[in-house]
Amino acid sequence: MSINTETAKVARTAKTSETDTRHGSLRSAGLSLLSFLSPLLLLALWEALSRAGIIDIRLFSAPSLIFKSLVPLLTSGELLLHTLVSVQRIIIGFLIGGGAGVILGLSMGLFPPVRAALEPMVAATFPIPKLAIMPLILLVFGLGETSKVVTIAVGVFYLVLINTMAGVLNIEPIYLDVAKSFGASRRDFYLTVALPGALPMIFAGFKLGMGTALLLIVAAELSAARAGVGYMIWRAYDMFDIERMFVGLLDMSALGYIFSNALDWLERFAIPWKDYK
């Protein structure tokens, strides 16, 4: 093969690679634009169907009416107050339930006796709907803040625990054998073998747990709450204030989006070696 032929082949390969890169960038930009426009298109369609009378605005208010209801809630600070109260309850319950789930999940994954002792109880109590145990939580912890935080913590706990244990059990045995051969202490097993190896599954549990926390906060704030987005939604339902109810639902949706992105950012920071394609 001559030098000219080889040079032409290299040039074609470089050109093909450049074309693929350009197509990849255009495709990525197109997907980003689609992600941005799709909610706006949905709102525009909703508004058009409402104005045409196809959608009953007594039950599904038009976006323009919801926006009119949103403005005074924003300017008065009422929506911010309800949001901050709910966020505080969610974060505290999430940290308590998630922290306990990680610690117990690591223990159950690392030590078969602990797993054998606790797994039947976890398997038996996990399927119980968390809303079904709310009366028990209210009886034990009362109607104050503690019962609302505990409700969220219980919902998060099981999902993080099960995912963490599965993450530890999926760690290659060679890593555990090497750590044992080098005389790793129990603390080293937790912090340098089990925790890094299970982190992808732990974050999967965190994301599932956050979704559950958002579901439970609405139910938790139904019981004797004086503030919170869930309280605002139920209060609007009682008064048949549909626009205000939709504002609460949209606020909850925005919280879910923010929490999801925050967990994604935290995951990328904590697991830089993971492939995020």
Image (tube, grey):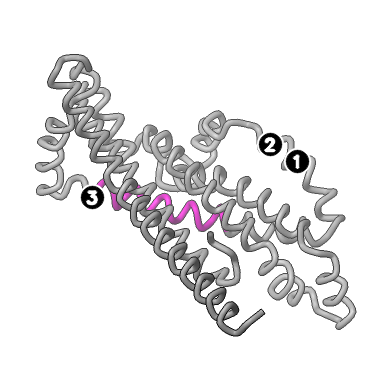
Given residues 226 and 240, the one toward you in this image is 240
Judging by the rendered image, the residue that carries numbered circle 2 is 125
Q: Name the magenta segment's main secondary structure.
A: helix
Q: Is residue 131 left or right of residue 2?
A: left
Query: Which one is in front, 205 or 97?
Result: 205
- Image location (x, y in percent) of residue 257: 37, 49
Marks 2 and 3 in Cβ contact (< 8 Å): no
Contact (CB < 8 A) between labels 2 and 1? yes
* Residue 49 drawn above or below residue 140: above
Mark 1, residue position:
121
The disc labelled 1 sits on which kind of residue?
Met
Q: Amino acid at mark 2?
A: Thr
Q: Secondary structure at mark 1?
A: helix
- In the depicted structure, whether residue 86 falls above or below residue 265: above
Of callouts 2 and 3, which one flags the residue occurring earlier in the amino acid sequence?
Answer: 3
Q: Which mark is residue 81?
A: 3
Q: Nearer the viewer, residue 267 or 163?
A: 267
Q: Position of residue 46 (x, y in %)?
A: 22, 27
Give how far apart the Cα atoms at labels 3 and 1 are.
39 Å
Q: Position of residue 49 (x, y in %)?
A: 19, 21
Q: Residues within 10 Å of mark 3 (few under 14, many from 20)?
A: some
Residue extent of the magenta highlight: 80-98
